[in-house]
Image (cartoon, grey):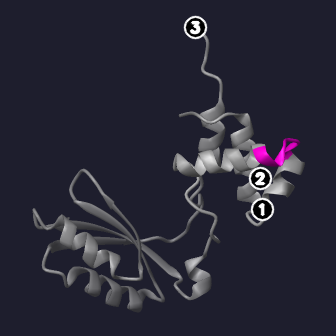
Amino acid sequence: MAIDRLDAALIRLLDEEPRLGVLECSRRLGVARGTVQARLDRLHARGVVRGFGPHLDPAALGFAVTAFATLEIRQGRGPDVRAHLASIPEVLELHTITGRGDMLCRLVARSNADLQRVIDHVVEFEGILRASTAIALENPVPYRVLPLVAAAVEEPEKP
């Protein structure tokens, strides 16, 4: 399931300039248009490339505060809690986790006062027993995957 150097170069190119067409990608990579299209189709089918939409900045949309909430949930209520959280626009991400909590949410809000409103909305559901929230102050390493792309094509060390 590994990717090769051409896949990595294609992914890197589209990450840098997501509006490039297949023909321009093929020109820049020095391969046939059909090769690029086949590679994109294969990467998409395997779930490596999940979409081609714009990357949005919540702060630019007016949601300047980012927080992470660790939730403890009532046993057996996981599916209901997931549905509740998915209905809240300010919940950007949800992970089930190990450790003290059961779920970890990435939340956004317009301000610290608005964050209280979002948290109140999150915990109003009876399946959520407790929430512990931390406000993010800075994002020195934004979400990224290109280093993983490079690591995926590295040659394994020889013994």
Cβ–Cβ below 8 Å for labels 2 and 1? yes
Residue 33 spot, x, y in % from top left: 82, 49
Residue at mark 1? 17
Q: Residue placed farthest to the left in the image?
A: 75
Quadrant of the frame with the C terminus: top right
Check residue 13 in the rendering and tell me which mark sits there, or answer none. 2
Residue span colored magenta: 29-34
Q: Nearer the viewer, residue 23 or 156?
A: 23
Residue drawn at 55 percent across, 57 percent down: 50
**Number of other residues with Cα within 10 Å of mark 3, as a class: few under 14, some 14 to 19, many 20 or more:** few
Which is more toward the observer, 95 or 44? 44
Residue at x 14%, y 68% (from the top left corner): 77
**Hey, what amino acid is under mark 1?**
Glu
Residue occupying image coordinates x 30% and y 76%: 85
Callout 3 touching callout 2 (CB < 8 Å): no
Q: Amino acid at mark 3?
A: Pro
